[in-house]
Image (tube, grey):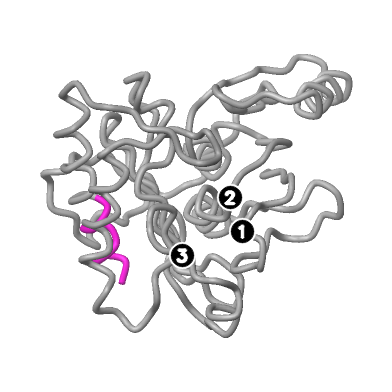
Amino acid sequence: MLELIVKAAQEAAKKILEIYAQDFEVFEKADASPLTLADQTAHKTIESFLKNTPHPILSEEGVHLPFVKRKNWNAFWLVDPLDGTKEFVKKNGEFTVNIALIKDGVPVLGVVYAPILNQLYLGGEGIGAFKILITPQQQFSMDMLNESNKIPKVAPDIFTIVASKSHHSPENEAFVEKMKQKYGNVKFVSLGSSLKLCLVAEGVAHVYPRLAPTMEWDTAAGHAVCLAAGKRVYQYDNGEPLQYNKENLLNPFFVAD
């Protein structure tokens, strides 16, 4: 399964990069978020890899089945074919392909691939978490999962907070101020897409507060990597883990650390 979803992410990345290199049109969804041909093409590519597995697919760019039809899914794929469309449109390279396997509401396997950065984060139950430098054209193998690529690494001495480049909220700002009061010297890192969760998994950042809206497909793959790295992703209000395949696919505010 891991090799399958890495290959799916790499193939989707190839399609994305073809469009990234061109002038492309940006559409607007009903919620005013951007949509490009790359989002849709990546979705179809990933779907072609996953459709023959035993598990159904819930993708940001696919059909969103009503809860009554998916509430009994014990295991399913949760996909964001192009996370960070705003970063894609800005052409700053900070966008990712996200594929996760959810079992009983928990992300148990995940891949986050940033093709411009050639950074592949992956993790799962019984596997651990890894960061691998790999281009879309290179062939992935399980031999790449070695100690030199294992995460997390040793955390930096300065308390480091990672946050979104595109989304800010008063709650986020208050959280940062609270951390400054607690730790004194605080470093602030701004980054796009699910790479923020991956920085926590990697140990580059101590905490990622997301006190602004996200959807389940935005977080699932990065959440899986965090769990495999021994990190936590929990609801800001009550400390409970984020859950998946809810009736409402909107995430509550959360913190990863």
- Residues 47 and 222: in front is 47
> Identity of the amino acid at label 3?
Gly
Residue drawn at point x = 29 percent, y = 47 percent:
40
Residue 3 lies within the magenta run:
yes
The boundaries of the magenta stretch are 1-9
- Residue 249's disc is 1
Which of marks 2 and 1 precedes in the sequence?
2
- In 3D space, how far apart are the residues under numbered discs 2 and 3 (Cα atoms)? 21 Å
> Going by the image, does 216 lie left or right of 95?
right
Compared with 117, 16 (above or below) is: below
> Going by the image, does 257 lie left or right of 37?
right
Q: Quadrant of residue 177?
A: top right
Q: In which quarter of the image is residue 89?
A: top left
Q: Residue beneath label 2, please?
A: 215
- Residues 245 and 255: in front is 245
Can you see residue 243? yes
> Identity of the amino acid at label 1?
Leu
Q: Residue beneath label 3, please?
A: 124
Which of marks 3 and 2 precedes in the sequence?
3
Which of marks 1 and 3 precedes in the sequence?
3
- In 3D space, how far apart are the residues under numbered discs 1 and 2 (Cα atoms)? 6 Å
